[in-house]
Image (cartoon, rainbow, N blue to C red):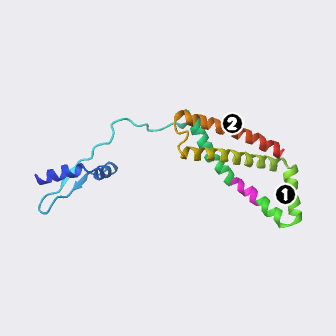
Amino acid sequence: MAARRAIHRLSRRPDLMILESYLKLPVVYSCGPGEKSAVKSQRPLSTAKRPVNLDLSSIQFPLPALVSISHRVSGIMLFIGLIFLMWALQVSLSSPAGFDTVRDAMAHGFFARVVLWGLLSALGFHFVAGVRHLVMDMGHGETLEGGQRGAQLTIIISALLVVLAGVWVW
């Protein structure tokens, strides 16, 4: 009888209930000296069917999610683009001839201009999306409508910055 009371008392503790939900093995509760330990069987947490294979290509993400994912992608592009910028800095600082090489590449090279325009565009978008996230961290635009408006504003301002970067580079 004491073992049943102990199981009932222990099964109502939230920390043990959380622990039980993560373990797949039966949970054993030990009792006082001279009493037998009791085993409580593990029940499944949910009987609902869960998807076995989730096809991400069939999911249509909302605009705020796409802007958030693009923010991460632009950060990766900036990190990779640092290779180009560090190379240009190293060559330009190595000698006056190296400086002229980098200056000519930036002024007349199509590939260098495309890379520079891409990096400036990624920087502009990343900056605007970062400001959007900071504003949301302050508690503004956390509703569905606010998130949608913030994502639209981010895209509009970023498009303007991309055009301005293109005008400046070309």
First in sequence: mark 1 or mark 2?
1
Residue 134 in the image: above or below residue 66? below
Q: Badge 2: few (under 14), some or many (20 or more) residues near its Cα, within 10 Å? A: some
Identify which residue, 127 or 53, lies in the foreground: 127
Q: Position of residue 49 (x, y in %)?
A: 38, 35
Badge number at residue 156: 2
Q: Quadrant of residue 90?
A: bottom right
In the image, what residue type sits under mark 1?
Answer: Val
Q: Residue visible at 87% across and 58% down?
A: 101
Q: Is residue 74 left or right of residue 53?
A: right
Left or right: 148, with 103 as reference point: left
Distance Cα–Cα, label 1 vs label 2 = 33 Å
Answer whether residue 59 is visible to the viewer in this image: no
Residue 39: say if magenta.
no
Does residue 144 sit above or below 40 in this rendering? above
Overall secondary structure of the magenta section? helix
Secondary structure at badge 2 equals: helix
Q: Amino acid at mark 2?
A: Ile
Residues shaded magenta = 80-86
x, y percentage for residue 14?
29, 50
Q: Residue at x 22, y 52 (%)?
A: 10
Residue 160 shown left or right of residue 39 in the figure? right
Residue 1, how many percent across, how many down? 10, 51
Instruction: Identify the disc placed on residue 125.
Output: none
- Residue mark closest to the camera, 1 vs 2: 2
136 or 155, which is in the foreground? Answer: 136
Q: Regarding mark 1 in the picture, which secondary structure is present there?
A: helix
- List the residue tagged with mark 1: 102
Estimate how packed mark 1 is, as few (under 14), some (14 to 19) or many (20 or more) residues with alpha carbons within 10 Å: many
Q: Residue furthest bottom?
A: 94
Please report the residue visible at 72 percent of the width from the left and 57 percent of the height from the top. 83
